[in-house]
Image (spheres, rainbow, N blue to C red):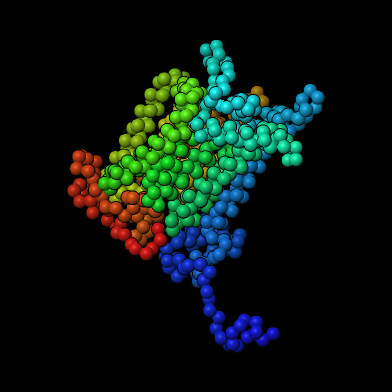
Amino acid sequence: MSEKAATGRPTGAKAKVVSPAPLAPDLHSADWRDTPGWNDPMVSRLSTAIGGPVGRYALLGRTRFFTPLRVLLLLAVVFLAFGWFTKAACIQQAPLGPNGELGLDWRGNRQYVAMCYSDVVPLYGAERLNEGAFPYATSWEEPAADGGTQVRYMEYPVVAGLYQYVSMRVAKAWDSASWLPGGLQVAIYFNVVALGLAMAWLVTVWATALSAGRRIWDAALVAASPLVIVHAFTNFDALATACAAGGLLAWARRRPVLAGVLLGLGGATKLYPLLLLGPLFLLCLRAGRIRVFGRTAAAAAAAWLAVNLPIMLLFPRGWAEFFRLNTERGADPDSIYNVVRSLTTWSGWDAATLNSVSLVLFAAACAAIAWLALTAARRPRLAQLCFLVVAAFLITNKVWSPQYSLWLVPLAVLALPHRRALLAWMAIDALVWVPRMYYYLGTADKGLPEQWFTVTVLIRDVAVLALCAAVIRQIRNPAEDLVRYGFVDDPIGGAVDQAPDAFPPWLPRVLRPRADHDSPSKSSEGTTRIVGVAP
C-alpha cells in the first residue's frame, strides 16, 4: 500500500500534530503545572519504575483518557483495595455455632494479632444494628464505671448514624435475596459500609486534586497515603473528609453557600469540618469579605440544623448521646494526656477537669493561630490555617482516635507541598497501628507493654508538631511557599484570593501586620490578578 493510500496525504507531506484536548496555558506546561519528576528527587527516583520522569519536550495537558485526575483516582482505588485486604481477616467465618452454624471468627484475638480491627464490625452488634431498629430510638443497658448500669444509645452524630442505619438495611436486603452470594450478615454489612467509605475517599481525592491547582500531583499523597491502607475502613471518617474537602473546593470556586452546606453536613458527620469556619472567618476579616463569610456560616448552620433537628425533636435522648459520651469519657489512649500519664507518675485528671484543660489549651492555640493569620506580612493561605486549627484540635483534645489522622491528610497536602516530609509523617502515623494492636492484645497474651505504644504516639505527635512548625515558617516567610508560584496567591482562597487587605477600622493595630499597619497593599504585595491563566 502506498503512503498516500495509507495516510490520505501526498507522499512526502508532513503530518499535522492535532491536540485531542485544549492546550495547557503554556505549550510545554513546565512553567505552569508542577512536574514532580523534574523537581522532586524522591519522585524522580520512583518514576524509574514506569520509565523515568516525563521528557523535556513532552506535550503535557493533551491526553484523552489518562489525565492526572484519573490517574490519581486509579491510584486511590488501588490503595483502597489494599485497605480492604488489611481488614478482610476480621470478617472471616467459621463453624462456631452449636450445630456448626457460621460465626465471625475472632478466635485467638484475631482482630489484634492480624491487626485487622475495624469499629464497623463490632458496632453492628454493639449499636443493636443487627436487630434492625432505628439507632436513635433504640436503647440498651451497659455496666457503668460506678458499678451500676448506664442506658446507652447510638453514639455517633446524625449523618454517621444514619449512614450506619442505611448500610444495615442494604445488608439485610442483600442477605434476604436468595439469588445473591451469601455470608454472615455482619460481613455483608462491613462490605456495604466499606463501599460507601471508598466512594467518599475518592471524592476526597477528587476535591483535593482540583483544589491543588497547578500542583495537582500533590494529591497523590492523598490517594496513596499509608494512612488509607490502615484507616480508610477503621471507622466512618472518610464521610467527613469528603464533606470537608468538597466544602473547600466549593469555596475555591466562589460558591460560598454550597461550601457552607457541605461543611455543615460534614459537621453533622464528625465535628471537625465546622472547625474550618474559623480560618475562613479570619481570612474574610482580613480581606473585608465578612458578608461572604456570613453566607457560608449561615448555610453551614442551616445544613447542620436540617439534618439534626428531626432526630433532636423525635429522639432527644438518643440525639444527645454523642455529646453526653464525649463529655463524660476520660483521656483516650492516643491523647497526649494519656501519654504523659503513661510515661510519668502522674495519675491523670477526672473528666470534668480534663474537659476544661483541653478546652482552654485549644482556645489558646486558636488565639495564637488567629494572631498569626492577622499579623503575617502576607495573608496566609486557607489550607495552611485549616491544617493548623485541626492539628491543634487533635493535639489538645482528650480524644485522638487513630482514624482521626485521616482528617489531616488532605489539609496537610494542600498546606505543605513537601512530599518527603508528609510521607514521613504519614508512615509514622500508620505504623503506630502495630504497637496499638499489640498493646490492646495485652501482656498476658504476649502483647506489648503500654509504654511501647505511648512512646510511638509521642513520636507521632512530634511529627505533627514539626509539620505545624514548617507551615508557620512558610506563613512568616511566604517566599518559601512552593504553592505561591509566580502570581498564584491562594488556589482555594475563593472570595479572598488575590484580594487586598481591608482590615476593619475597629481592629486594634496590634492585630495587623507589623510591616505597615495602615497600608493593606504592602501586606498583599505580589497578589496582582492575572487574567487568562487557569488557577
Which of the two residues, 433 or 22, is positioned nearer the viewer here? 22
Which of the two residues, 144 or 523, is positioned nearer the viewer here? 144
Image quarter of residue 274 = top left
Q: Can residue 116 be spotted in the picture?
A: no
Query: What is the residue that sits farthest to the bottom in this orientation?
Result: 11
Which of the two residues, 515 or 533, is positioned nearer the viewer here? 533
Quadrant of the frame with the N terminus: bottom right
Residue 357 spot, x, y in % from top left:
38, 25
Q: Can residue 151 be spotted in the picture?
A: yes
Image quarter of residue 285 = top left
Residue 345 spot, x, y in % from top left:
47, 21
Relative to residue 349, is residue 530 drawn left or right? left
Quadrant of the frame with the C terminus: bottom left
Relative to residue 528, is residue 74 drawn left or right? right
The vertical placement of 413 against 12, above or below, is above
Which residue is drawn at the image coordinates 38% and 24% (left, top)?
A: 356
Number of marks in the rendered image: 0
Which residue is drawn at the image coordinates 19% and 43% (left, top)?
A: 505
Which of the two residues, 184 or 358, is positioned nearer the viewer here? 184
The vertical placement of 20 against 526, above or below, is below
Relative to residue 473, is residue 452 drawn left or right? right
Which residue is drawn at the image coordinates 55% and 64% (left, top)?
A: 64
Query: What is the residue that sits farthest to the right in this orientation?
Result: 99
Residue 175 spot, x, y in % from top left:
70, 35
Residue 193 spot, x, y in % from top left:
60, 38
Which residue is drawn at the image coordinates 61% and 83% (left, top)?
A: 8
